[in-house]
Image (spheres, rainbow, N blue to C red):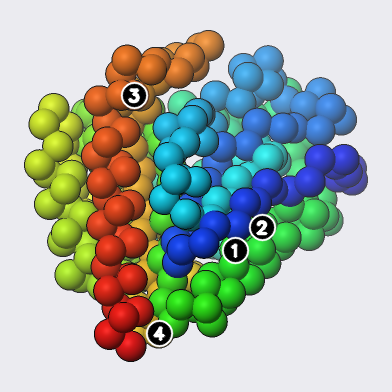
C-alpha cells in the first residue's frame, strides 16, 4: 500500500514577535484511501487535540507565529521521533504511525491494513518532514531577528485515560523535557501561573514532560526556550463524541493560558534586550 494526499501538511501564519505556537495534533484529515482501512470509531479521529486553534484565538493579538497540522495523528504523529522510538520507555505509548486508539482498540479494520515500512516512510516524507522543516526554519528566523525564540507546543487530552495514567489527569501539564528545553526560571513562572489558576490543577514535568518537538527544538543555552502544555480537554470542551467546543467552559481557562504565553514573551523579550 502507498500513501498519497492532496492536502498540504500544515497551515502557517508568521507573526512579529519571538514566539511560535505549534499545534501538531489538531489535524483531522485522513486521505479517503487510508480512511477506508480504519475502523468506524477511528474514522471519527477521537484522539485529536480538538479546537485548540479556537482556544488559542488570541495568538495573532500577541504577535505569535502559528503552525497548525492538517492531517490526523492517525496518519502520522508529528510529536514522535522519526525513527519511531518511544518517548517514554517502559510506558504505554502510541507510535509514529499509530495502530491503536488511546483506549487500546485497534485503529485498522484488519491487521493486514496496517502500514509497512515503505508506507511509513512515505507518510514521513509527505507530512512529518515538511512540518518539522517549517518549525525549525521559523525558530531560526526568530533567533536571527530577535536573538532569542520561544516555542510553545500546544496539546490537549482526555482527562481520564487509564492506559496512560491513573485517575484524573492534572489540568495544566507543563513539560520542559525535565528542565532541558527551557530556562528553569521561566518554567517556574509558568508553573506559578498555573497553580494560581482557581479551579484548575497544574504540574511541571509530571506525567507529560514534553514530546519530541519540545525535546528536539528546545535549546535554552542558545536562547531557544521550548515548553509543552498538555491540557485536559474537560477544561474547554466535551470529551466524548461529538467533541463540541464549550465556550462557557473554555472562557474559564483561556485567560490563564494567555497569561502563560504573555509570560513567555516577556521573558524572552527581556532576554533579547539584555543581549
Mark 4 crowd level (few <14, some 14–19, many ≥20, 10 Å Cα): few
- Label 3 vs 1, first from the N-terminus: 1
Q: Quadrant of the C terminus?
A: bottom left
* Left or right, residue 80 beside residue 196: right
Could you classify mark 1 by the number of other residues whose Cα lies within 10 Å: few (under 14), some (14-19), or many (20 or more)? many
Percent coordinates x, y for residue 128 in the rendering: 69, 56
**Residue at (65% x, 51% y) in the render:** 12
Q: Earlier in the sequence, mark 4 or mark 2?
A: 2
Which percent across, then down, holds residue 250? Answer: 34, 24
- Of pointers 2 and 3, the one earlier in the residue sequence: 2
| Identity of the residue furthest to the bottom in this view | 275
Numbered badge on residue 44: none
Q: In the picture, which quadrant includes the N terminus?
A: top right
Q: Report x, y in % for residue 63.
A: 47, 54
Whether residue 251 is visible:
yes
Q: Quadrant of residue 75?
A: top right
Task: Identify the residue under disc 1.
Answer: 135
Q: Which mark is residue 222?
A: 4
Asked if the residues shown at circle 1 and circle 4 are in contact, with their CB atoms under 8 angstroms apart, the answer is no
- The residue mark sitting in front, 2 or 3, is 3
Q: Is residue 173 above or below residue 183?
A: above
**Residue 171 falls in which quadrant of the image?**
top left
Q: Secondary structure at mark 2?
A: helix
Please tell me which residue lies in front, 127 or 61.
61
Q: Is residue 164 left or right of residue 114?
A: left
Amino acid at each position: 500500500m502507498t500513501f498519497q494526499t492532496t492536502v498540504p501538511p500544515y497551515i502557517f501564519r508568521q507573526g512579529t514577535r519571538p514566539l511560535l505556537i505549534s499545534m501538531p495534533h489538531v489535524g483531522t484529515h485522513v486521505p479517503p484511501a487510508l480512511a477506508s482501512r480504519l475502523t468506524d470509531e477511528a474514522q471519527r479521529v477521537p484522539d485529536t487535540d480538538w479546537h485548540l486553534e479556537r482556544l488559542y484565538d488570541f495568538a495573532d493579538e500577541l504577535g505569535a507565529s502559528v503552525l497548525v497540522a492538517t492531517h490526523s495523528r492517525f496518519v502520522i504523529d508529528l510529536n514522535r521521533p522519526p525513527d519511531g522510538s518511544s518517548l517514554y520507555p517502559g510506558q504505554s505509548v502510541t507510535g509514529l504511525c499509530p495502530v491503536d486508539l488511546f483506549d487500546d482498540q485497534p485503529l485498522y479494520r484488519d491487521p493486514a491494513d496496517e502500514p509497512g515500512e515503505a508506507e511509513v516512510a512515505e507518510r514521513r516524507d509527505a507530512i512529518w518532514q515538511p512540518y518539522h522543516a517549517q518549525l525549525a526554519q521559523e525558530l531560526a528566523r526568530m533567533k536571527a531577528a530577535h536573538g532569542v525564540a520561544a516555542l510553545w507546543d500546544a496539546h490537549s487530552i482526555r482527562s481520564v485515560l487509564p492506559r496512560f495514567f491513573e485517575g484524573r489527569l492534572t489540568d495544566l501539564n507543563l513539560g520542559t523535557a525535565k528542565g532541558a528545553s527551557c530556562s528553569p526560571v521561566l518554567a517556574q513562572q509558568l508553573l506559578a501561573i498555573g497553580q494560581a489558576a482557581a479551579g484548575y490543577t497544574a504540574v511541571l514535568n509530571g506525567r507529560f514532560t514534553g514530546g519530541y518537538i519540545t525535546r528536539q527544538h528546545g535549546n535554552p543555552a542558545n536562547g531557544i526556550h521550548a515548553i509543552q502544555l498538555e491540557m485536559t480537554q474537560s477544561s474547554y470542551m466535551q470529551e466524548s463524541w461529538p467533541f463540541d467546543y464549550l465556550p462557557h467552559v473554555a472562557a474559564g481557562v483561556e485567560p490563564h493560558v494567555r497569561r502563560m504565553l504573555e509570560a513567555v514573551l516577556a521573558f524572552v523579550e527581556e532576554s533579547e534586550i539584555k543581549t
